Amino acid sequence: MNEYGFELALAAHLETEREGILSRQLGTAVSGRRIMDLVWVEPGPEFHSRVELTAETIPARAIESDVGPGRFRFWRDAFDNHPETARSTVERAIDCGFFEQERRTGRTYVRQTTRYPEWFGRLVGIENKPDLGTPGDLETQLLTDVAVGLLDEVILATESYVTRAHENRIPDPVGIWRFDRERGELEVIRESESLPTDDGGVDIIDRTSTRTEIQIVTPAEKQRARRRVAERAYGKGWRTDELPGCTKLDPTNPQLPETQREAGLPYCRWHGQIVQPATTCDPDCEGYCTGDPPDIDTENLRERRTGWVSDPTGHQRTQSGLDQFLD
Ligand code: SF4
């Protein structure tokens, strides 16, 4: 079953139904390797301040550093990291407009252009498993999400008919959605329960039939990880693949439900479904027919359909970007 197409169809549906920021394939463990299929970031009280700041992900190390919004500080005094790491963090923070710089006696001083806003609320993770007949690591993945409690809610989205036996294998706090991608209809089979995101948690690093390796997560580590997830989601979004030059690509095909037709999805007329261009589309494909890629501006689409802004005004008060040499 085409999991990629399911994921994109669901992303397109959610984008029209909910406010906030949607992203896909984000790391949601503190120490482990869990990747969540979709993460929905609900807007917090200062969402608009975050939108004005930058369209990109603000580097986590810049937010966690001792660089504040008040006085300028010598950049190296504000970081515990290796100087090279600190240097690249400062450069990226200046580039994206979160830091501004000032030169004094041959040294670079930095400060935040504005206080980092409280911009996000609840984080909702959605694990996609269109076919519950081939669950793979699903149970371990969901147990990991519940044990660490990094996200406020976790939901399993499927296309399968959900039996009582399926429900019993899914941890209680995890919600269940059934999404019909061809009709673009979503049915809530079971509501999710809120996870205790303010408490500590347990990260499952590895789990086999005989042993489980865990790591304790403190509340402070969890809050930092939540902010990293939200920032990553803000900068990344969910439209990631370049669309190839094939005339069979037809994002506005009338076969697609309305919520998907306007979303810029890589729907292929030849295959009659959404395809993953990076793995499916090349001149060896039987249906390949060379032509211009569809005229789709993914940044523009994202801006029109969500609260994200591609080119915000920013908060920089001093000139920056002319001198990136830090000493
Ligand atoms: S290359 Fe093949 S899979 Fe990709 S759009 Fe063209 S026909 Fe479809």
Image: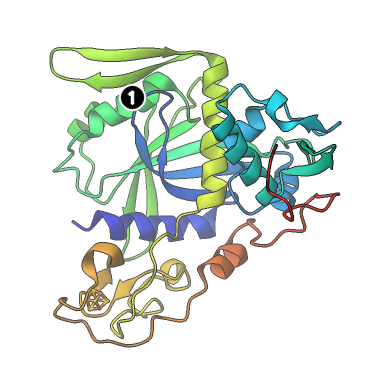
Q: Which quarter of the picture shows residue 64?
A: top right
Q: Is residue 43 above or below residue 228?
A: below
Instruction: State which image quarter holds ligand 1.
Output: bottom left
Horizontally, residue 261 falls left or right of residue 2, namely right
Residue at x 24% of width, y 29% of height = 139
Horizontally, residue 168 falls left or right of residue 146, namely left
Q: Quadrant of the C terminus?
A: top right
Crowding at mark 1 (Cα within 10 Å: few <14, some 14-19, many 20+): many
Q: Is residue 32 above or below residue 291?
A: above
Nearer to the camera, 58 or 269 = 58
Q: Is residue 191 visible?
A: no
Q: Is residue 48 visible?
A: yes
Residue at x 23% of width, y 27% of height = 168
Nearer to the camera, 47 or 195 = 47
Where residue 173 sits in the image (x, y, percent)? 39, 26
Q: Quadrant of the N terminus?
A: bottom left
Q: Amino acid at mark 1?
A: Thr
Most distant residue in the front direction: 106
Where residue 47 sits in the image (x, y, percent)? 70, 45
Where residue 119 sits in the image (x, y, percent)? 68, 39
Horizontally, residue 150 falls left or right of residue 80, namely left
Q: Which quarter of the picture shows residue 268?
A: bottom left
Residue at which label 1 appears: 144
- Secondary element at image label 1: helix
- Color encoding of the figure: rainbow
Where residue 245 sits in the image (x, y, percent)? 33, 81
Nearer to the camera, 228 or 210 = 228
